Image (cartoon, rainbow, N blue to C red):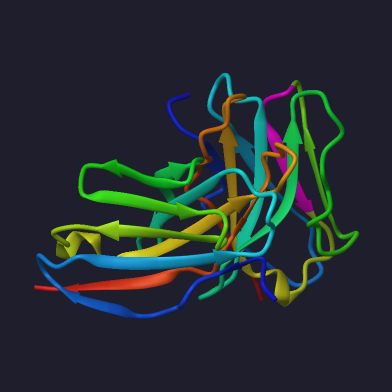
Amino acid sequence: GAGVSQSPSNKVTEKGKDVELRCDPISGHTALYWYRQSLGQGLEFLIYFQGNSAPDKSGLPSDRFSAERTGGSVSTLTIQRTQQEDSAVYLCASSFPGFRGYTFGSGTRLTVV
Amino acid sequence: QKEVEQNSGPLSVPEGAIASLNCTYSDRGSQSFFWYRQYSGKSPELIMFIYSNGDKEDGRFTAQLNKASQYVSLLIRDSQPSDSATYLCAVNHSGGYQKVTFGTGTKLQVIP
């Protein structure tokens, strides 16, 4: 597609439920990243996929968080047993192999009540 | 010490003035430096990247890099009210790695 597509745009969930966030990167972008941004805070790196290489999961805050990327394209970020501190905007980005910076999607605003 | 540091602001400048945004970083091996603009409630948008020491100009924007001082800045000439946003500095990790670390951003307010 023309841009990075994320869905849903907004998600309200009850504490303890699992959620799945989806990202469809720009066609041809081999690298895909997940960040989250809490209210008034900077961007926190979560996970990075590059082609068929093993992902860099060093930013995942706990084992409740996981992500996968199928076929080198669409990625799903899963948060199990959501907590209120998980409330944030989850941003997906992708980039070309030559890397001239990321293109971000519009984000998923997650609210845990 | 944070990996990427920015003054949170707000930085207020009158319309037509030059806005100067600054950023320092800790990883001396970093090779790539980026400036993103983020309007309230929106996603960050890449506006500049710079790899080499010196200045890089694109329209009203100039990025300046000094690797010896581990310092990168963004100048916005002829500031417009539409430039009012938070500006995020981002720095890659050394070793050619594509992951970048973002600063917390500087909020710029351009006063008409």
Of A5 and A36, nearer the camera is: A36
- Residue A11 lies, in percent from the top left, at 59, 59
- At 83% from the left and 59% from the top, the residue drawn is A80
Q: Which residues are magenta?
A: A72-78
Q: Where is B28 relative to B13, above or below?
A: above
Task: Work out whether residue B40 can be spotted.
Answer: no
Q: Where is B22 relative to A35, above or below?
A: below
* B19 displayed left or right of B27: left
- At 47% from the left and 48% from the top, the residue drawn is A106
- Residue B10 lies, in percent from the top left, at 35, 80
User: Which quadrant holds the N terminus of chain B?
Assistant: bottom right
- Residue A87 lies, in percent from the top left, at 65, 70
Q: Where is A1 relative to B53, above or below?
A: above
- Residue B54 lies, in percent from the top left, at 41, 47
Q: Is residue A76 magenta?
A: yes
Number of numbered discs present?
Answer: 0
Of A2 and A55, nearer the camera is: A55
Q: Quadrant of residue B83?
A: bottom left
Q: Is residue B86 magenta?
A: no
- At 58% from the left and 19% from the top, the residue drawn is A28
Of all residues, the one furthest to the right in this rendering is: A63
Task: Work out whether residue A67 can be spotted.
Answer: yes
User: Which quadrant holds the C terminus of chain B?
Assistant: bottom left
Q: Where is A70 relative to B92, above or below?
A: above
